[in-house]
Each structure stands twice: as C-alpha cells, then as structure tokens.
Image: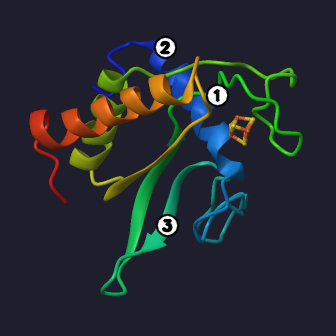
Amino acid sequence: MIFENDTSLMKKLQILSDAAKYDVACTSSGVQRDGVKGDIGNAMSCGICHSFAADGRCISLLKILFTNECIYNCKYCINRVSNDVPRTSFTPEEVCHLTMEFYRRNYIEGLFLSSGILYSPDYTMELICRTLHDLRLRAKYNI
Ligand code: SF4
C-alpha cells in the first residue's frame, strides 16, 4: 500500500503537490480539465506532470515540493511566509517511499522535486541531498 492507512502522508502529498503546481517548468503545469461523460481523459493541475527526455520520449514525473514551510516572503509566491495556506514538509524517507511506490505502479518515471526553504538554505539542501542519496543508493532508483 502506498499510504498504509497513513492519512497524514496522503495529506502531505495533497498539500505539497498542489503547492508545486505553480512551478511552471514542464508541459502540463497548471492544466485542469475534468472528464466529460462520453469522452475520454481528464487532467489534474497538480501531482503528476510531463516532460521530455533527451531522446524525445515524454515522461511522467511526480511533481512535489519537499516543503512549503518557507522562511522567505517572495511577493509573487503562493508559499511565501506571510500567505495563509496549509503548511507541511516531507521527510527524505517519505519522498523515497512515495517515489518508489508510484514508480512500481507505473504511475511515474521520475521525480520533479522542488522546495521552499525550511529553517535555512543549507538545512533544506541537506534534506534534499539525503533524499536523492537514499533514492539512488538505498532504493536503487537508477533511471
Ligand atoms: S524562497 Fe520561498 S517564498 Fe521565495 S519563491 Fe521560493 S518557496 Fe516561494
């Protein structure tokens, strides 16, 4: 089970995938299209986005922030400290778990990980490096 009855992890995923949708660095950012009866397909504005590999393949990416508990107050940003939005952070273990479980189910082929700044830039980068280290070396994610 991806969430193993862990509603707090599901809630984190909802908050931090929604918070990442404004990071317009891929082809499907921010597109919301509901399914229509009799037609095929729908699209969510957050969660899984698409990008292109060097060989031209379209690939699906789990698109999340590591944290939106940002200490900074960039005026243009929804995650600025002065904005009243739900806040949370993943742990490196949680990002690894979600990435591997989504990958095993063929939902995604990669991870688009961005982040606000938790406590300090160095602290945040340490957490992200730990996440990538664990994905590569513990989970053997080598795509
Ligand atoms: S540093 Fe924080 S407030 Fe500024 S753009 Fe990044 S997430 Fe937003």
Which one is in front, 120 or 93? Answer: 120
Mark found first going from the N terminus, 2 or 1 = 2
Cα distance in 3D space between marks 1 and 3 = 22 Å
- Identify the residue shown where x is 27% and y is 48%: 103
Rendering coords of residue 104 (x, y %): 21, 46
Q: Is residue 121 left or right of residue 78?
A: left
Q: What element carries label 3?
A: strand
Disc on res. 50: 3
Rendering coords of residue 16 (x, y %): 59, 32
- Identify the residue shown where x is 72% and y is 51%: 22
Cα distance in 3D space between marks 3 and 2 = 26 Å
Kindly check if marks 3 and 2 are in contact, taking CB atoms under 8 A apart as contact.
no
Disc on res. 7: 2
Residue 134 falls in image quadrant = top left
Kindly check if marks 1 and 3 are in contact, taking CB atoms under 8 A apart as contact.
no
The C terminus lies in quadrant: bottom left
